[in-house]
Each structure stands twice: as structure tokens, then as C-alpha cells.
Image (cartoon, grey):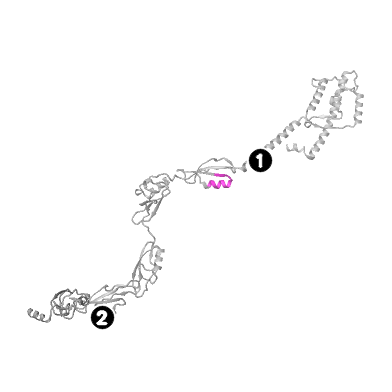
Amino acid sequence: MSDFLSNFSGENYEKTRQEKNEQQSKTDHQSIKKKLKFDKNSINKESPVVEKNEPSAELVWGPKNSPDNMSEKVSQNESMTEKKHPEDLIYTKKRVKKKKNEQKRTSEKKSVPVAIVSENQTKNPNEVIETDPTYQQKKIRKYSLIALGSILTIALLYFAYFQMSHVKVPNFEGKELSEVREWTADNGVKLKVDQKYDFDKEANVIIHQTVKNKKIKKGHELVVDASLGADPEEAISLPDFKSMKLKEAKKWINEQKADNLAIIEEYNDKLAAEDYIKFEITNKDVKAENYKRKDKAKVYYSKGKEVFEKDIAMPDFVGKTKEETTEWAKKNEITLKVNESDSDNIENGKIISQSIGKDTKVAKRDSMAVTVSTGKALIVPDFSQYTAEEAESKANGLQVQVKQFFSDEIPYGRFISQSVEIGKKYTEKDEKPVIQVSYSIGKPYIKDLRDNTLEGDLQKIFYDEYQSKGANITYQVYYVDSTVTKGTVVKMSQYNEFIPINSVVQIGISKGNLKPEENKSADKATE
């Protein structure tokens, strides 16, 4: 086909045209000779004149090539030629010189009688028209190929455009929403997400999509339904976790999709692993009977007793500070017990001793004890070994208050008691008390208060002399008639002698209502 079309372009077209013209020229000569011969034969048949050189044989005319049919055929060809479009024919014109044509005509007139010439020839004897019988087929084939090529080109262009402007949507059902977002962003497709609760699908999983395994134009919208998971407002009937092991509880939570119910595992020295410990709901207003999937709760299960490997080397803390020891124990999760003790050599706040020796291997949660110095201690002495005069100087820096008390049993000068126990220690940080030390001054001795003591002085005398020193000696007064100044002590039941510490002394107080003479007669009467 390409070879055929190449003949109609450029130089090939001109060359083809020249070859066609030469061929047409030869064909015209042959056709003219045939027609002239045909005319001669027809004239000779009608006229009696016969050329000597012509053959004597009679010509046979068929139904199709008879002179009548020939004339009709020539007229039909002329009419068809007139009707046909000029582009449907290939015209080959042969220009013959006028002189040559005239000579040829004269020669023909001499040899042949006048013959019937077709209408086309009489009109333009210098022009012969020839029709290519395969031209129509070639033309149809040409335009068919052009049409087919155009259709294929348009189809290819449309296919390429369709491929560039459309994209195939995969099946996203059951996949993550993030995967759909990434795909739509990469392929220029708009995404609309409708979210709804679905118990059977996890959150952000695709439930349904409008287009699946089909082409969609870029820029158009893809609608997908994404799951929000199980409905948080749905009420859930809680089981009895006490009768459930850890695995059973996890299975129940997974089946019910109770994501807000957390399982807490913790070590427990008393319960075996996977045993129930306790259950609690975070919101105190929510009860187990009306628990919903959205409510937060915790169920605790035991991990059993925690066992650690003994891989921690114990340092030597003697002489180091309490703070340094405490920090190490906290960092290594060692339980530390701190005791305190005074020390004459280790200053306050530093370690005196430790229960676990240096470089001993211990494990987490092991216990150790250390003794921390409180500095040099003040020890309460035994004051029974000292006299009242020595007590204050032997107090070792402590404050001492010495007192003396009457005693029916303890002799004078002997130790009675002390307010703080013997050997008690007081450190620098302790608040130190005043130690009360008591010594005996023996039994109380009552003096003679007659004639020189007034009733008003008795309270002070009995308190200062006896009661303040531990003797519970009291007095009772009575009044007597006497010439002595009123209010003067004139009589005592006991005086100038030792008396028990629990005694009552009878004291007579003068009324001062008698004269001296009356007093004498009163005395005589008394005698």
C-alpha cells in the first residue's frame, strides 16, 4: 500500500505521469487504427468497390460488436464519460501537429471512403480519453486505508488518554484507612470517608467502597466506609474475674473488645502467678451493673514472687555519709534499714557499720542494715556514787539540779533518786533534759516555836522547813487564854525532837485576853 501511495507524491508522481502519457500515446494510435480499419470494412461492405490489397474474406459481426451496437456503445461511453467526475478518470492528451493530421486524413480519404466517426472524435479529433478499469478499486482501497489509519490513530490516542486520566481502584475492604489515604494521594483521587461503628471490624479498617477493581477518573471521588470499632456506649455484662485466670480474662476482654478494661500484672509474694488480686472501676459513679464499653476499669493479676539474680556487689560504706548510702540503695533497689548509734570515733551522720560485708553479691529487693553515727554521746552517770556536793561536777556536760529531802529510812547525805536513768545517752541532735538528783537529809526535826513565833509565820515555816523537803508535816491550831500577845504561839504538842515525815503538830495560839495576875492564879489553879 505504501508503494502505491508513493507513486502519487513528488517526483514519483511526475515520472509516473510521463510513463502513463507515453503508454496512452501508443494506445491511442492502436485504437485509431482499429477504428479506421473498422470503418473501412463497413464502407467496403456497403460499396462494391473493393481494394485489391484487402482480404477477400467476409467479416463476421457479433451482436456486441455490430456497427449499430458500436455506435450505441460509443454514445453510451460518451454519456458515461460526461457523467463521471473528472477526478475519476486519467486523461492522457496527445497533441498532434495540424499538418500531420491533415496529411493522415488525406491519405485515408484516398484509400478509404468516408466513414462514420464517433461523436467524441468529431468534436475533438486531437484528444483521446481512456479509462483505467482498476482505478475505482485503487481509490476505494486508498480511502479505506486512510480511514482505517485515522480510526486506529484516534483509538490509540483515546486509549493513551484513558490510561493517563484513569486509574484502577484496588480492593481496600478489610485494609487500613491509612493505606487508602496513601493510595488516593499518590494517584490524584479524592477521598471521602464515612465512619460508622462495626463490632466485627477493628477501628480504621475499611468496611465498604463505592468503586472496587474498576477504573476511576483522576480527580473524581472515592467513597469508603471506615469502621470506628465496637460501639463504646454498648453495655457489657462483667464476668466474675475472681474465678478467672489471667488467660481467661484476656480472652474475654478480646472477645468483648473492652479496650478500656486494662489488665495490670504485678508481683505478689502471697499469690501464685495468674491469680486474681482485685478489680476496680476508675469512675466511682459507675457500678459493675451498668458498666459500658467506654468506662475505664482495671483488673489486677499476680505475677508471683519476683526473683532476682544476685549480681550486685556490695560496696564498703563505713565512714561514708548516710546520704551516699541511701542513694546507692535506691538506685539498686535495695531495701535499706538505718539504725543510729553514738560513736567516739565516727562523726555525726556517717556510717559506723553495715550488715552485709564488702564485695558480697546481693540481688534487687534484698535488705541490708547500716548503723549511722550520731556523734559522741553524753551518758547519764550513776549519781548514787557521788555526794550532793559532787553531783553537779560529775554530770558529763549534762544539766543537774541537786535537791535534799527528808527520809525516815535513808540516813542523812545518802542518795535517794535521779530523774533520768543511769547510762542513758544523749547525742548532739537530742534535746537534753535537766536531771533531778535527790539526797537524804534524814528525819525531820521540829524546833520550839513558842513565845517567838506568830501564827502568821507558821505557813512559811512549815513549807520551807519541812514540806518543800519532802516531809508531809502539817499543823493544827487552837486558841487559848493567855497574857501573851495575841497571835503568839504559846503551846506545841511536839518541839525540839525528831518526828515522822507524816506528822501533825498541835499548836496553841494566845488570845491575849488575860492580865499577868490572872494569869498567875490561872496557873496555880492549873497546878
Quarter of the image holding residue 344? Answer: bottom left
Residue name at image x 12 percent, y 80 percent: 515
**Total numbered badges shown on the rendered structure:** 2
Quarter in which the N terminus is drawn: top right
Quarter of the image holding residue 25? Answer: top right
Q: Is residue 314 visible?
A: no
Q: Is residue 98 visible?
A: yes
Is 187 within the magenta?
A: yes
Q: Vertical placement of 248 versus 473: above or below?
A: above
Viewer-closest of 134 and 399: 399
Q: Vertical placement of 132 versus 61: above or below?
A: below
Q: Vertical placement of 119 versus 378: above or below?
A: above
Residue name at image x 79 percent, y 39 percent: 12
Q: Residue type at mark 2?
A: Glu
Residue with the mark numbered 1: 157
Element at label 2: helix
Viewer-closest of 133 and 336: 336
Percent position (x, y) of residue 45? Answer: 87, 19
Q: Is residue 189 left or right of residue 28?
A: left
Q: Residue type at mark 1?
A: Leu
Stretch in magenta: 179-191
Graded by Cα atoms within 10 Å as few (under 14), some (14 to 19) or many (20 or more), the crowding at tag 2 reads few
Element at label 1: helix
Percent position (x, y) of residue 440? Answer: 21, 77
